[in-house]
Image (spheres, helix red, strand yellow):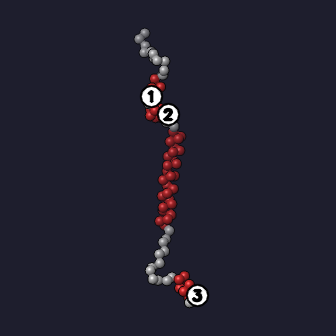
Amino acid sequence: MKEKTNTTGQPDYQHESTYALLIRSEEKSRNVFEMVIYTLLILGPLIAIWQFAQRPVNIPAAGLQGARGAAWAQNNV
């Protein structure tokens, strides 16, 4: 007959912290979705940087004229 009674009439989980409620209501499908989104957000810029790194850069040497410069010089003389 010595049962613990809830004198306030409120369930025990109502006194939990917000963090405890968030942990208890963890959604598995949302976690998988977030992992996919975060992976794409990381891979996107990495792929863009890799594309620019693979592109050749042609910098003409100072004082030298290439084929385009020589043809322009001949036409304007």
Secondary structure at badge 3 equals helix
Which residue is labeled 2 in the image?
25
User: Mark 3: few, some, or many residues within 10 Å (few <14, many ≥20)?
Assistant: few
Which is more toward the observer, 1 or 67?
67
Q: CA distance from mark 2 to mark 1?
A: 12 Å
Q: With respect to residue 23, does 76 lie above or below? A: below
Which of the two discs, 1 and 3, labels the residue nearer the N terminus? 1
The Cα–Cα distance between marks 1 and 3, rounded to whole angstroms, is 84 Å
Q: Is residue 76 above or below residue 27?
A: below
Q: Position of residue 2 (x, y in %)?
A: 41, 11
- Three-letter code, disc 3: Asn
Viewer-nearest residue: 37 or 14: 14
State the residue at coordinates (54%, 82%). Answer: 68
Which mark is drawn over residue 75?
3
As helix, strand or loop, the secondary structure at mark 2 comes to loop
Amino acid on which the number 1 mark rests in the picture: Glu
Q: CA distance from mark 3 to mark 2?
A: 77 Å
Q: Are marks 1 and 3 in contact (CB under 8 Å)?
A: no
Q: Name the residue at 48% across, 53% down.
A: 42
From the viewer's perspective, is the residue at label 1 or at label 3 nearer?
3
Residue 52 coordinates in the image, percent (x, y): 49, 65
Question: Which residue in the protein does label 1 denote?
Answer: 16
Q: Which quadrant, please, contains the C terminus?
A: bottom right
The reply to whether the C-beta atoms of the residues labelled 2 and 1 are less than 8 Å apart is no
> Closer to us: mark 3 or mark 2?
3
Q: Earlier in the sequence, mark 3 or mark 2?
A: 2
